[in-house]
């Protein structure tokens, strides 16, 4: 009686496992992680040892400059000390700096094709290293004591050489052949506005980290929105595993609501079996998506909109300080211009030259915005509140000029100093208009999460006065989500070159 596996296979009837799709019925081959994962591991090893070499060479150079040049005469110095006695400090300092680089995720795969993020991590790590290494000396009273000049030189040298080394590495890996091997290939299951937004972000810059290879129809063979022409439709959800293997996908992004719950769970499990990352694109949050946070409430994970950048106390306080200084400078610098045009308005149309108008500010609170009057005294007596239009008959002769050059907005520096407004932010609207806007335009009132501004992200893109309000809201929300001081400075500079229209 032959009990070999061959005889058992010959005698046993053929059995097909249930629920096999076309891909599973092929000859067995275990799908392994796609090449970006392997490429990243090699690159991490290379960069780690490269960083270590650069760090230790920088600290050795700092020692030589501090103790083997004319700088040795500065401060207290033990003549008997040499490199051998200081080598322990170099080793400890190098290990500490390398630990900080790892701790701040310099070797995160996303950083190799993102040089700005890399430079930020290096700057943070080197700054903390100088303080921490000096603190280590004071706390442990190391003998010989660590020189403060050595720490400063070491931090500076490490900063410069790490940035130089990483820039060189970046110039190599961003070459199309290498960058393509490092990028993750992504497919979307379903498609909506957030998918389009993600795809646009993925494609930004020459060295983007993710490439979109296509989209798959969700439940019922449909999309919430049709994908653009540059995103091919790869098929339907029923053929998911075949598409997954044929496309060499590394990342699957599923639109929430495009599949039934059971299908979603099955798809997530399939991704795990196929060594593919699974991500969920929320469809119930079509606004402020970058502020989404996962938090735990009594052990239960809850997804919701967390703090926006300007909700953090430090950012808010720093922006307020900038507003006060900028508001005072603006009032002083533009006082002569305001005086000249106020007189021109008065001589053309007797009456108050400063116009107060009710607007809605932070958290829906009303305030009076200040303007140099550009229209007749009774401009709105016979009509309903609304925006000005081209060649508005209510406008003064001098009003056309001051509105074209935004001179009527200059008194709002006083609103900034008082705290009603900021130098930069969404432009405030009138309460009568907002009553209609908030019902007609989704997420309109989200713009009231921050102070309104004298100028804004929408305005420097030409969206002033009688322009598409929906487009203005998109820019306002983008500003709220992605606020930083560099963006504020950019908007203030652009304001001088984007004066068309008024609001």
Image (spheres, grey):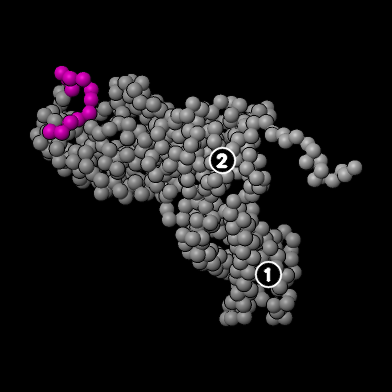
Q: Does residue 411 belong to the magenta stretch?
A: no
Lateral position of residue 477 relative to residue 257, left or right: left
Q: In which quarter of the view is residue 44 placed?
A: bottom right
Residue at point 30%, 48% (across, down) = 494
Which one is nearer the viewer's eye here, 500 or 66? Answer: 500
**Pointer 2 local density, CA inside 10 Å: few below 14, some 14–19, many at least 20:** some
Query: Residue 251 location in percent, x, y?
Result: 55, 44
Which one is nearer the viewer's eye here, 201 or 323? Answer: 201
Report whether residue 369 is seen.
yes
Question: In the displayed structure, would residue 28 be above or below residue 165?
Answer: above
Question: In the displayed structure, would residue 115 be above or below residue 496?
Answer: below
* Quadrant location, the N terminus: top right
Give the dominant element type of the magenta stretch: helix, strand or loop.
loop
Residue on which the image places disc 1: 90
Disc 1 element: helix
**Segment tinted magenta in the rendering:** 380-391
Residue on which the image places disc 2: 242
Closer to the eye: label 2 or 1 = 2
* Quadrant location, the C terminus: top left
Residue at point 53%, 49% (across, down) = 184
Disc with the residue nearer the chain's start (2 vs 1): 1
Which one is nearer the viewer's eye here, 87 or 398? Answer: 87
Q: In which quarter of the view is residue 132 placed?
A: bottom right
**Pointer 1 local density, CA inside 10 Å: few below 14, some 14–19, many at least 20:** many
Query: Residue 362 location in percent, x, y?
Result: 40, 30
Query: Residue 420 location in percent, x, y?
Result: 37, 33
């Amino acid at each position: 009686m032959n009990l070999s596996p061959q005889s058992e296979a010959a005698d046993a009837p053929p059995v097909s496992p249930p629920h096999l799709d076309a891909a599973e019925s092929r000859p067995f081959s275990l799908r392994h992680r796609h090449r970006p994962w392997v490429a990243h591991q090699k690159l991490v090893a290379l960069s780690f040892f490269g960083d270590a070499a650069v760090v230790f060479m920088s600290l050795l150079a700092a020692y030589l400059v501090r103790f083997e040049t004319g700088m040795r005469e500065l401060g207290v110095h033990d003549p008997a000390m040499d490199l051998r006695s200081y080598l322990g400090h170099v080793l400890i300092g190098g290990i500490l700096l390398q630990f900080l680089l790892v701790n701040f995720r310099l070797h995160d795969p996303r950083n190799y094709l993102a040089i700005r993020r890399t430079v930020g991590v290096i700057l943070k790590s080197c700054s903390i290293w100088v303080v921490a290494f000096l603190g280590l000396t004071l706390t442990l009273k190391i003998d010989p004591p660590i020189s403060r000049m050595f720490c400063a030189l070491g931090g500076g040298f490490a900063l410069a050489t790490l940035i130089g080394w990483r820039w060189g590495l970046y110039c190599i890996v961003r070459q199309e052949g290498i960058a393509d091997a490092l990028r993750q290939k992504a497919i979307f299951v379903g498609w909506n506005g957030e998918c389009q937004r993600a795809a646009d972000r993925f494609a930004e810059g020459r060295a983007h980290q993710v490439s979109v290879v296509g989209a798959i129809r969700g439940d019922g063979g449909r999309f919430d929105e049709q994908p653009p022409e540059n995103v091919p439709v790869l098929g339907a959800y029923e053929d998911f595993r075949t598409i997954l293997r044929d496309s060499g996908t590394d990342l699957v992004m599923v639109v929430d609501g495009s599949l039934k719950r059971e299908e979603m769970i099955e798809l997530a499990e399939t991704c795990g079996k196929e060594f593919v990352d699974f991500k969920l694109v929320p469809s119930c949050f079509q606004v402020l998506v970058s502020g989404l946070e996962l938090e735990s409430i009594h052990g239960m994970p809850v997804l919701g909109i967390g703090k926006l950048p300007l909700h953090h106390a430090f950012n808010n306080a720093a922006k307020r300080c900038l507003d006060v200084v900028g508001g005072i400078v603006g009032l002083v610098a533009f006082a002569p211009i305001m005086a000249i045009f106020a007189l021109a308005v008065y001589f053309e149309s007797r009456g108050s030259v400063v116009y107060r108008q009710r607007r809605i500010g932070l958290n829906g609170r009303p305030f009076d915005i200040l303007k140099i009057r550009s229209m007749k005294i009774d401009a709105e007596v016979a009509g309903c509140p609304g925006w000005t239009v081209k060649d508005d008959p209510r406008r003064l002769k001098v009003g056309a000029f001051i509105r074209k050059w935004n001179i009527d907005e200059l008194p709002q520096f006083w609103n900034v100093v008082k705290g009603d407004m900021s130098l930069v932010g969404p432009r405030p609207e009138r309460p009568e208009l907002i009553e209609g806007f908030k019902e007609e335009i989704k997420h309109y009132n989200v713009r009231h999460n921050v102070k309104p501004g004298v100028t804004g992200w929408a305005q420097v893109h030409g969206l002033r006065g009688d322009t598409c309000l929906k487009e203005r809201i998109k820019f306002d929300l983008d500003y709220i989500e992605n606020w930083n001081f560099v963006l504020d400075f950019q908007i203030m500079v652009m304001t001088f070159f984007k004066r068309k229209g008024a609001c």
